[in-house]
Image (cartoon, helix red, strand yellow):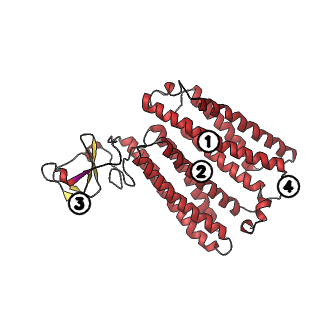
């Protein structure tokens, strides 16, 4: 392998995008509380597959931290012990983080796979940091950013715990997603620096302004999207997963702003496309930007007019994160000459 660092970088970025997608699937399926504790799942490293595994049993060995469901409440083993013929409260403590005590095997394994992908992504970024130590003299910034990514992944894991402990408070889910986008941005910076220098192109100030504006509009659009998603989550709680027709019956004003705002994002990037056409220069990441914008609009139309068809929500979020990544990469490209004036950004 000629460049193990770049290989790990691409793997790490791909895994982070995969975790974002998995997280969206968790929300779409209502599986967020499939594992009511953290980091284990019902106190197990490998979660149960049947509800019978969570029922108290006589003459059974229990480990400290293992969880059972008793009278629709969670009980956690206070220490290692072997149960007798009768249930004894002294061996168990009530689970006090929340009062959610429902087992659904599908939800449990969807959430478990989401967590497993998060662990794999964390290990990948840890390996990325270790390999980056070999670059510390030649390019200190690479090692520093790689370290910040590790810190971010750790913070993200802690945020995941707070989300579960809060029984999926919407604003905590939003913060959790925002942190994922920060990690994506840091990985995009590293990816750009690892790519070979591109042919130098002179970009004027108007184009640079439009690119920054386009990226800012996308971030704002995603922010509004999270607010809409919070509203949809509340409607799902009220109407259930099987009634998507009713989720947007009384949509808040922010939904309509979010929907119309996509036209502003499209127009801004259309102007950028016109300016790039005039200088006969279309970077591949900008073509990706245009593709992702159109796909975002299509999936948005599908969700509103066709009652949230299966997988439209996770695809919508994944495309938004890919759009953000492509715009970040393109923004770094057009400011390349300015960045190179800084000793930190010289190649």
Residue 94 is a magenta residue = yes
Disc on the earlier residue, 4 or 2: 2
Residue 177, how many percent across, how many down? Answer: 54, 47
Q: Quadrant of the C terminus?
A: bottom right
Residues marked 1 and 2 touching at CB (< 8 Å):
yes
The residue at which mark 4 appears reads as 202
Disc on the earlier residue, 3 or 2: 3
Q: Is residue 7 left or right of residue 113?
A: right
Calculate the distance from the C-alpha at mark 3 to the C-alpha at mark 1.
Answer: 47 Å
Calculate the distance from the C-alpha at mark 4 to the C-alpha at mark 2.
Answer: 29 Å
Residue 218 is a magenta residue = no
Residues marked 3 and 1 touching at CB (< 8 Å):
no
The residue at which mark 1 appears reads as 222
Q: Is residue 312 visible?
A: no
Element on which disc 1 rests:
helix
Q: Is residue 295 visible?
A: yes
Q: Is residue 157 above or below residue 304?
A: below
**Range drawn in magenta:** 92-97
Calculate the distance from the C-alpha at mark 4 to the C-alpha at mark 1.
Answer: 30 Å
Residues marked 3 and 4 touching at CB (< 8 Å):
no
Residue at (33, 46) in percent of width and height = 49
Residue 80, how many percent across, how many down? Answer: 23, 60
The residue at which mark 2 appears reads as 181
Disc on the earlier residue, 4 or 1: 4
């Amino acid at each position: 392998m000629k460049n193990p660092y770049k290989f790990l970088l691409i793997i790490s970025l791909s895994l982070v995008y995969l975790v974002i997608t998995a997280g969206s699937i968790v929300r779409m399926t209502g599986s967020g509380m499939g594992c009511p504790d953290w980091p284990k799942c019902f106190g197990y490293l490998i979660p149960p597959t049947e509800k019978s595994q969570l029922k108290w049993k006589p003459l059974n060995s229990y480990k400290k931290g293992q969880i059972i469901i008793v009278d629709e409440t969670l009980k956690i083993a206070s220490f290692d012990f072997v149960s007798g013929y009768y249930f004894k409260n002294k061996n168990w403590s009530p689970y006090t983080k929340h009062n959610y005590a429902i087992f659904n095997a599908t939800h449990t394994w969807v959430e478990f796979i989401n967590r497993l992908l998060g662990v794999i992504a964390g290990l990948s970024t840890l390996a990325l940091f270790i390999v980056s130590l070999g670059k510390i003299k030649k390019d200190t910034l690479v090692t520093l950013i790689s370290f910040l990514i590790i810190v971010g992944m750790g913070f993200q894991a802690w945020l995941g715990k707070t989300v579960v402990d809060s029984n999926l408070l919407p604003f905590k889910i939003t913060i959790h997603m925002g942190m994922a986008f920060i990690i994506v941005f840091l990985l995009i910076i590293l990816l750009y620096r690892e790519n070979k220098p591109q042919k130098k192109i002179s970009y004027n100030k108007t184009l640079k302004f439009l690119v920054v504006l386009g990226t800012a509009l996308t971030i704002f659009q995603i922010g509004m999207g999270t607010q809409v998603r919070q509203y949809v989550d509340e409607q799902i709680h009220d109407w259930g997963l099987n009634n998507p027709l009713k989720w947007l019956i009384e949509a808040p004003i922010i939904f309509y702003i979010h929907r119309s705002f996509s036209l502003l994002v499209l127009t801004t990037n259309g102007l950028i496309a016109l300016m790039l056409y005039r200088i006969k220069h279309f970077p591949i990441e900008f073509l990706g930007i245009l593709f992702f914008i159109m796909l975002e609009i299509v999936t948005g139309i599908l969700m509103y007019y066709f009652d949230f068809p299966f997988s439209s929500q996770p695809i919508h979020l994944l495309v938004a994160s890919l759009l953000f990544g492509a715009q970040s990469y393109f923004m770094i490209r057009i400011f390349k000459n300015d960045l190179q004036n800084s000793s930190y950004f010289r190649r």
